[in-house]
Image (cartoon, rainbow, N blue to C red):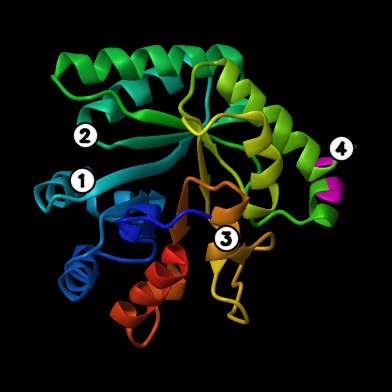
Amino acid sequence: MKKYNNPSEKIIIALDGMDRNNVFNLLEKIPEITWVKVGLELFVREGPDILSILRDQGKKIFLDLKFHDIPSTVARACYAASQTGAEFISLHTCAGVKALKMANEAAQEGASKVNLMPPKLLGITILTSWTYESFASDLLINQSIEQRVLHLAEIASNSGLGGCVCSPREVQSLREMHPETFELITPGIRLLGSDINDQSRVTDASEALKLGASKLVIGRAITQSNDPSYMFKSFCDKVSI
């Protein structure tokens, strides 16, 4: 694995479970943070203004709202989201090819209207909370998680999306099929021996990058630690190895 001149570029801090005061405190403790993920919790609590605030602080944003609806609704949502300045926007790949293509076109148009660089749309494959057992019993899908992830990532790529979100367990297979320009964003990152919380398919930070991940989404392992700055540096050191 190559060394990175700026390892913080490889780490996206998930601001889950926070309000704006928590976010400000975290960014004050760790000014080196480059990327942040704004998910449903923070977005619903604080509204879209939080995106402007983060942009004003020079942060790059992964807007992780996981849009999933009929094609026209998904497209309109991505049109609006593209005007926030977020670099990444997520939507569920299982919304289907029509929805993905319409969303990608809408995002390009929306960003262009306000003179912004268009965001990369990321297709959610299978959430890292799913286990092999629950995938089969809850959804009655007679297919392995790995097979379904590969299929959904192919749909995302063929629809013109900029990448996908997958667990680190599927990264190697996906990277063998897709070029470096296709972003593979991986949550489920932990330090070895740490609590996995409500995620199932997890791995270590350096291992995920070795397997081909583009960027790592890390949340509670840093944000809920006793020393977030130390933990952030620890992950940066892992990325730099």
- Dot 4: what SS? loop
Q: Earlier in the sequence, mark 4 or mark 2?
A: 2
Q: Amino acid under label 3? A: Gly
Q: Amino acid under label 1? A: Leu
Is 70 located above or below residue 182 in the figure? above
Which one is in front, 44 or 105?
105
Q: Earlier in the sequence, mark 4 or mark 1?
A: 1
Q: Can you tell which mark lies on residue 51?
A: 1
Please give left or right for residue 235 compared with residue 148 in the image. Answer: left
Residue appearing at x 60%, y 77% in the figure: 192
- The residue carrying mark 3 is 188
Name the front one of labels 2 and 1.
2
Is 102 located above or below residue 147 in the figure? above
Q: Amino acid under label 2? A: Gly
Task: Locate residue 107, reporting x and y percent.
Answer: 33, 20
User: Which residue sits furthest left?
Assistant: 56
- The residue carrying mark 4 is 143
Disc 2 + disc 1, Cβ < 8 Å: yes
Residue 138: in magenta span: yes
Please give left or right for residue 174 compared with residue 138 in the image. Answer: left
Q: Can you tell which mark lies on residue 85?
A: 2
